[in-house]
Structure formats: structure tokens, C-alpha cells
Amino acid sequence: MKWVTSFAIAVACVIMANGISYAGDCNCDPCATAAENTVGASSDCCKTRTVMRSHYVTEVREVPVTTYKKEDRTRTRNVTRRVARVETREKTYTVNVPETRTKTENYTVNVCVPYTEEQKYTVMVPETTEHEQTYKVCVPFTEQVEQTYTVCVPKTEQVEQKYTVMVPFCETKTVTYKVNVPYTEKVEQNYTVCVPVKKTREESYKVCIPYTEQVEQTYQVRVPVKSTKQVTYQVAVPYKEMVTQTYCVKVPYTEKQTRTYKVKVPYTEEVEQSYTVSVPYTEDVESTYSVKIPYTENVDQTYTVRVPVKETHEATRKVAKCVPVKTMKSVTKDEGKYECESVECPSANPCCPPKVIQKKVWVPNLVTKEVECTTMQRQVSEVPYTYTTTCYENEERTRTVCVRKCRTEERTRTCKVTKHRNETRTRTVCVPKCRVEERTRECSITKYRTETRTREVPVCKTRMETRTCEIPVCTMKCETRTRMVPVCKTRVEDRTRTVSYCEMTTETRTRTVCVAKCRQEERTREVKVQKCRAEQRTRMVPVTTMVKETRTKMVPVCKTRMETRTRMVKKTTCKPETRTRTVNKSRMETEDRSREVSYTVCVPEERTRSYDVTVYDNVTEEVSEAYTVCVPVKSTKEIKVKVCHKVPVTIDCCGNVVEKAAEATEAAPAADKAADKAGDEA
């Protein structure tokens, strides 16, 4: 349709180019109207002619349209699956069975053989001799000596002592004191109040009004197109193949051998042996020792005693009393109240005007007053008093003390001393010995020889097979479509509203306030006061004094005198002596022996066992499958098309239209554009 319209427009342009005469060929004014040119010009000069011009008309035409409808269909396809089955097979294997056997084995033993040997040795033989020895001894003796000593004998006496006692007594005393009596007084007070006054004002605001506009939008859609595709694939098919395999086996065999071995045979032999014995004996020996003998002595000793002494002192102490004192202090009191206030609250919706709400607000009114108050102050005064203290004085005294001492004395005593002398004796001892004997025995020896054997072994292999199958393939096809989309837009409008607001005005008011005051009154009361008076009293106190007495006593005094004495002292000397003795020794000799030895041999034995193998078989099945197909449906629809028709028009020589052949005409370029657009839509 597009090329037909273009061709028609081109033909119309050629016709118009041939039929139009240009202004100036007939000497006419191109700026004048057609009527003026017709009247002013001659009939030969200005002639009219008929020209074909384009005229567009909207027509309704039927156009074939293809639409797609989804249709559900079913098809069958072959599916291969692997089915498992268990297969029992037999396998031959070789097992080494242990077998116990005995054999005679020759071995060599080291036998211990004892023997005797004479050996020389040196002995130190002790020899005792007696010698006469002179020595001095201090012999103690005791003498009685008279001794004078002093004794302090205690003596107790009753002494009269005076002392002072503070006796308490109570007195009644009248005391005058002051009391603050509270009373209330009414006072007139001026205060200021903020009174709210409501007013209105007009304000302008802007509102955003939403509206919806339909906009044409182009979008792309991916339409699925289903098709089938033939695919070639390879499958590894397993199969088994028997292969001949060569392997080596060690076969055992037994050989007998005669072996010679040595054995050490033990035997006992009696041998005479000499030994030395240490024989104990007792001797009386005289020894000197020291003894410490205790005795007592009286010694004068000086010691210090702390004697108590009482002293009376005078001092002052501080006594605190509470005295009432009147003072003035400033007290601040809040005498405010709650008042209503208008507050503008913004709305959640920006299009709505803000709300005006009333809320209570506390208006403070601080009033400061001077108030009289009574406080108790603490006053400290000094009061004299008497107190008694006990002191201690040091006093030196003497006493006689018994002191225990010791003196050393040397004495002699006879002691029994145990000594030892060596004696040589003989005894018969059984000595174990060994002799070497040579013996023979037969031994079984196991040896192995290598044999080469063959066996059939199943080997699993695979071969590649090429197969084909059809696979459904889905491809996507892009289509460009248009749709009308609603777009939300807003326009701003200016509006006005009346807003009420609250202003606060100050007012002075008067009120009566109760004020608390105090007046001072003097009162009296009786108080009991406790006092003390001093009284002199006497008492009998026991006093102990020490009286010295001189006494005598007989004291034993130990003394010593030197004496010269003699004694026989034994002296032991050692002299060397060479002797001989028989020493038992042993040597190791080799002896061959035989014994029965058990050993284990592994005998190869062939056995058969069954085992299960899982084999998979390929089974082909037909499976039905549902799929969707887009089926094309052809139909017609009516569309509006602009068609260009050639209409005859009478024009003069200047190109002005004299007579219209149609009711409405359109310019050729605009008509060409409209025709192109209609052709594109078709």
C-alpha cells in the first residue's frame, strides 16, 4: 500500500508542474487578486484552466490479521532407563592352610665346668701384750661447813586509811525558757495574669492537585517458539572378555639333614674348703669417768616493786547547750496557673491545611517573701571538775634466793669389753661342674621351588556406540508492541484560608493570701538536777612489811685430793702372715645337643565361592508428554486509511483558484505525510 500511495503522489506532482503557468507570462500583477486580474486584463492575455490537485479522503478498509491461540497437545517419546538385577557367579581362589609338623634340631649349648686352683694370700695376725701404766686420780671427799644466811620474814599489820566518796543527791530547779507560738495573718497580694485573646488572619497556601494522563509506550515481548532438534550422543556399552594370565607360585617341599651338636652335662663334686671364723671373748677393763654432783647456795638478789600512789587533779570540760535564735529567711513560692493556648499542628497529608488545637500551658508566677523562723543554735561553755588518778612509783628491795650449782668429780669403774679372735676351720662343699658331650640329630628343612602357572581372568571393557534422539527446543522471538500507560502528574494551585490564632494580654489582679507568722512567749518549768557532795570516810587496810632475820646452817662442801695408781694395759699389734687357699673357679665349654621342634607349614588349597554381582539392563519405555502449541488464526479487521484522490480545480494564469471542485482541500506536502503515515499503520 505504501508504494501505491507514493506513486500516486509523484504522478500528481508531474501533472501540476505541467499545468501551472507562472506569473509574468501574461503581464499580470502577481500580487493582485483574481478578480482584479480578470477585470483589468484582456481575454486573450489572462485565461483560466483546469488543473488536477490532490485531495485526501478517510476510508474504512478490511485488513487480514493473524493471531495466535494456545492449544494443548500430547505426544509419546521413548525413555531409556537402567534396571538393576542380581547375578550369582562362582570364583576359584587359593588359600594357604597352616599345617603343624615336627623335626629334630641340633643345637650347641655352653656348659659351665667348675675347677679348683690354689692361691696365696697375706693375713694380718693380731698379737696382744700387757704393759704396766701409772696414772693419777682425783679422789673426792665431803666436809661439813657452817654457813650464815639472812631471811626476810613477812609481817602483816592493820592500818587505818582515810578516803573521800562523792555521794549523789537530786535538787528541783525552776527554769525559764522561750517558745515560738505560730499564728496566721491574711495579707492582700497583687499578681499578674496572662489572658488569651482569640484573633483570625487570612493566609495563602499552595496545593498540589494530582491528575492522570494517558501516554503511549512502546515495549518488547519475548514470544516462546517451540521446535524439536535431533541430537547425536555416544554411550559406553560394557562387555566382558576372558584374558589368559601367567602367575608364579612358590611350592614348598621338605628335606632331611643330620646335624651334630654339643651338650654340657652337669655333675657334682665334693671339695674340702678352709674358712676363717671370728670368735668373740670378754675382758674386764677399768675406765675413768666424770660425774657432776649438784649443791645449793643462798645468794642475795635485788628486785624492783611498783607501789601505787593516788593523786587528785582539777580540770575543766566543755558542755554544749541548744539556745533558740530568731532569724529571717527568703522563701520563693510559685503561684502560677494553667492557661489555654492555640497550637497549629501540621497535617500528615501535604494537600490538607494544618489543624489548630488547644492545649493547657502552665504560666509560672514566682513570689519571694521574707519569713521569720526560729533555729536552735549550739553554745559551748567550760565547767570545772575534780578527778583522781593512780600513779605507780618504783621501790628497790632485796631477798635471799637459793641457787642450784654443780661440781665435777672423776671416778673409776670396771667394764666388760667384748673382743674377737680369728680361727681357721675346714668344711666339705659340693661344687656343681659340667662336661661337654657331642651328639647328633636329624632335622627336617622346608624349602620352596618356584612354578609358573596360567589362568583365565575375566576383564571388563567398554565400546562406544553412537545414538540419536529428538530434544524439544524452545526459542524466544522478540516482538515490539505499544500500549497506553496512565501517568500520574500534579499541578500547583494557589488558595487562601482563614486561620485563628491566640494572643496573650497581661492583667493585674488582687487576692488575699494567708501568711504564717510566729510570736515569742516566755514560760517556766521545774527541772530535776543531779549533784554530788564529798564525804570523808575511814577503813582498815592490811599492810605487809618484810623483817630481816639472821640464821645458820651446816652445808656439805665437796673437795678432791690427788692419788697416784698403777694398772696393766693390753696392747694389740698386727704382723703379716702368708697363707695358701683353694679357690673354686668355672669355665664355659661347648656341648652339642638335639631336640624335637614343632613348626607350621602353609599348604596351598584351591576353594570355590559364590558371590553376587549387580548387572544393569537398558529398558526402553514409551512416556506420554503434554505440551502447548501456538496455532495461527486468520481474521479481518476494519481500519481507517487516508486515500489521495485527484480533483479538478480551475485556476487563472497567476495560479489563483477560480472554482473549487471539492469542499475541503489539503496542501500536497501535508497530504503526502498523512498518506505515508496511513500506509505505515496499514
Image (cartoon, grey):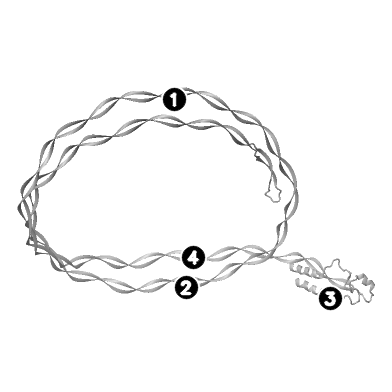
Amino acid at the residue labelled 2: Arg
The location of residue 656, given as percent across then percent down, is 88, 71
Residue type (three-letter) at the residue carrying disc 1: Gln
Query: Which is more foreground, mark 3 or mark 4?
Result: 3
Residue position marked by numbered label 1 in the rendering: 530
Compute the Cα span from label 3 to label 2: 85 Å
Q: Return the disc, 4 or 1, that comes first in the chain's sequence.
A: 4
Task: Say which quarter of the image contains residue 164.
Answer: top left
Quadrant position of the C terminus in the picture: bottom right
Figure quadrant of residue 629: bottom right
Q: Amino acid at mark 3?
A: Ala
From the image, tell me which residue sits under label 4: 82
Q: Classify the position of the N terminus by image quarter.
A: bottom right
- Which residue is identified by label 3? 17
**Image side of residue 370 versus residue 29, left or right:** left
In three-dimensional space, the C-alpha distance between marks 3 and 1, rounded to whole angstroms, equals: 154 Å
Name the residue tied to disc 2.
463
The kind of residue on which mark 4 rests is Arg
Measured along the vertical axis of the image, is residue 92 above or below residue 166?
Answer: below
Q: Is 130 positioned to the left or the right of 534 in the image?
A: left
Q: Earlier in the sequence, mark 3 or mark 1?
A: 3
Single out the mark in the foreground, 4 or 1. 1
Which mark's residue is nearer the viewer, 3 or 1? 1
Residue at position x 16%, y 40% in the image: 294
Pointers 1 and 2 in contact (C-beta within 8 Å)? no
Image point 77% across, 72% down: which residue? 6
* Distance of label 3 from label 4 (alpha carbons): 85 Å
